Structures are given as C-alpha cells and as structure tokens.
Image: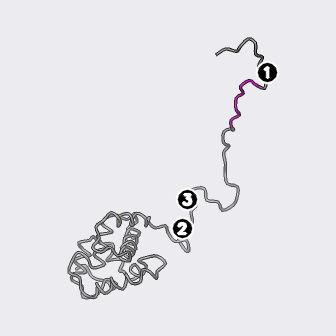
Amino acid sequence: MGQQPNLEITEAERPRSSPEPPPARGWRPTKPGVITSPEQVPRGGRFGAAGPDAGWALHLLSVSDLPDDDPNLRGVLAGLMTARAAALGRAPIKEDLEVALVLCGYGFEAIPELIAQRERWMAAVPHETRPGETAVSEMDRELMINKPEQVRWALAHAERPPGEPASLG
C-alpha cells in the first residue's frame, strides 16, 4: 500500500533492517593437554581401555523375556554381558545375554553349586559399585568368550561352578 500524500514519514519511522550476528569464527584449543583428536586419547597403563556401552546391555535386557524379573539378576546379567562384549572387543549383543543366562544356570539342568553361586552373585549386587562386579571377577574369561552351546555343554558336564576353569573337551 502506498503512502498517503498528506502524511510525512520521518527517517526514524522508516523500517530498518535488523542487524544479524556475524558468522562464527574458527576456534582452536590453546591450552596444553586439550584433546583434539581420537589419537590423542591416552590408553593403557592406569588409563585402561574403553569398554563397550553398558547401556545397550540394559536395553537388550529390557526387551528380552527373562526367567526372573529380579533387578539383582538384571545387574548380574548386565555385568556378564558387558564383560563378555569387552573381552571380544565389541558392543553387547543377544548372544552375550544368552551366555550370561547360561553362566547363571538358566537354560539347562544346572548343578546346585551353580545355582548357589547365582544366588550369591545376586545378593552381592546391592553392595557393589558396578552391578555384577562379583560375578565378573569370579568368572573364567576363557569360558565366557565361547559360544552359548559350548558354555552350556561345559557347565552341564562340570562338577564345579564356573569360577574355576572348565575344559570344553
């Protein structure tokens, strides 16, 4: 719409463009010790090595049908799943859950010592910094990294709990 001829518009009343911020400038760290690339992340020694995401193990547990809905069992299973995944250098998968269940005595006719060990692990969960820490510390790593069928066979034919090395025959 045009301006009315009898109205005078001053400079202050005219529309003005609003100023925009300038584009962001580049930034580089200037402090010593600031990590700028993955190669600079310290590894080994006291730094250790980063393990897999335990949150994914918890997700797998939440969508799985577990034999018992005890939160302490979930802590033991998550600890065992994460430890197995870290030993194999990857994130947790369903196979890790299956192995963890077998290590806890589910899915086959377990010996009474294995069931007692599972109960002890579950009782320790509320007192642990990382749930499942006792189970992981007592587990034989060589047994844990095998396929679920091999672990099931080894435990079904063992006369001792899995904290001691069991041969796969």
Whichever of callouts 2 and 1 sits on the residue coming sooner in the sequence is 1
- Mark 3 burial class by Cα count in 10 Å: few <14, some 14-19, many 20+: few
> Nearest the camera: 45 or 81?
81
Q: Nearer the viewer, mark 2 or mark 1?
A: 1
Whichever of callouts 3 and 1 sits on the residue coming sooner in the sequence is 1
Q: Quadrant of the N terminus?
A: top right
Asked if 89 appears above or below 3 in the picture, the reply is below
- Mark 1 burial class by Cα count in 10 Å: few <14, some 14-19, many 20+: few
Q: Nearer the viewer, mark 3 or mark 1?
A: 1
Q: Which residue is mark 3?
A: 39
Please state the horizontal and vertical placement of residue 81, each as a whole percent of the image: 37, 70
Please state the horizontal and vertical placement of residue 3, each as a whole percent of the image: 70, 15
Q: Which residue is mark 2?
A: 43
Q: Magenta span covers which residues?
A: 13-20
Please state the horizontal and vertical placement of residue 61, each as a whole percent of the image: 35, 67
Badge 3 vs badge 1, beta-carbon distance below 8 Å: no
